[in-house]
Amino acid sequence: MISQTAEYALRAIVFLADQGGVPRTNVQIAEATQIPVGYLAKVMQGLGRAQLVSSQRGLRGGFRLSREPAEITVLEVVNAIDPVRRYSVCPLHLPSHGTTLCPLHRRLDDAAAAVEAAFQGTTIAGLLNVPTSRKPLCRFPCSPVPLN
C-alpha cells in the first residue's frame, strides 16, 4: 500500500513525536525504529525538506519534529517521501479513454482516495494516544520483554 521508504519515515516521525522535543541522532532513531542508519539519513533529508523535522548540530544535536504531533498527519509524512499514487487519466494513455478511467483504474483510484482520506484523518499524536503497552512500532518506546 505504501512504500518501505514511506513506512520508515512514519516510524521515524512517530519515534520523534514520542521523545518530548528532545533531539535524537540518526543512530538513536535507527536503533529504536530498526531502520538501516544509512537509509535513514536519506529519509530524514526528505522529512527535513518537507519541514516536518528540523536538525540541530552539535553535542546535543539531532532531529526533532518541526511541529506538534497533533498538527502532523500521516498523509503529510507519506506525501513528503512517496505520495499515494492517484489516477486522473488512463496510465496506458489510451485515446479512447480520455479522462474517463476504465473500471480497473477507477477502482484503484477510489482505493487510493480512501487511503488518502484515512491518512489525512490520522495525526501522529493519535498514533501515540494509546496505552503504553500498545505503543506503535512493536518494542519502542517500551522496554523489550526479556526472553525466558
Image: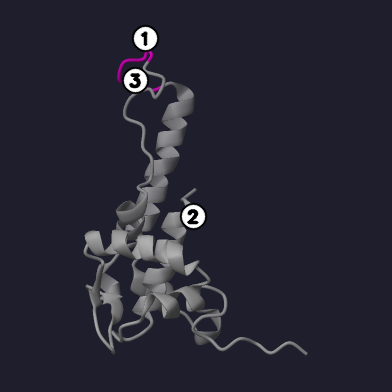
* Residue projecting furthest to the right: 148
Q: Position of residue 144 (x, y in %)?
A: 61, 86
- Marks counted in the figure total 3
Q: Secondary structure at mark 2?
A: helix
Q: Secondary structure at mark 3?
A: loop
Q: Position of residue 112 (x, y in %)?
A: 41, 42
Q: CA distance from mark 1 to mark 3?
A: 9 Å
Specify the amino acid type for callout 1. Ser
Q: Which residue is mark 3?
A: 100
Can you see residue 91?
yes
Q: Are marks 1 and 2 in contact (CB under 8 Å)?
A: no
At a point 32% along the width and 86% down the height, the residue shown is 20
Q: Which residue is mark 2?
A: 4
Q: Relative to residue 32, is residue 2 depicted above or below?
A: above
Answer with mark 1 or mark 2, whichever residue precedes in sequence: 2
Q: Which residue is mark 1?
A: 96
Front one among 34 and 126: 34
Q: Position of residue 132 (x, y in %)?
A: 50, 86
Asked whether 100 falls inside the magenta stretch, the response is yes
Specify the amino acid type for callout 2. Gln
Q: Which residues are magenta?
A: 94-101
Label 2: few (<14), some or many (≥20) within 10 Å? few
At a point 43% along the width and 80% down the height, the residue shown is 28
Q: Relative to residue 20, is residue 94 depicted above or below?
A: above
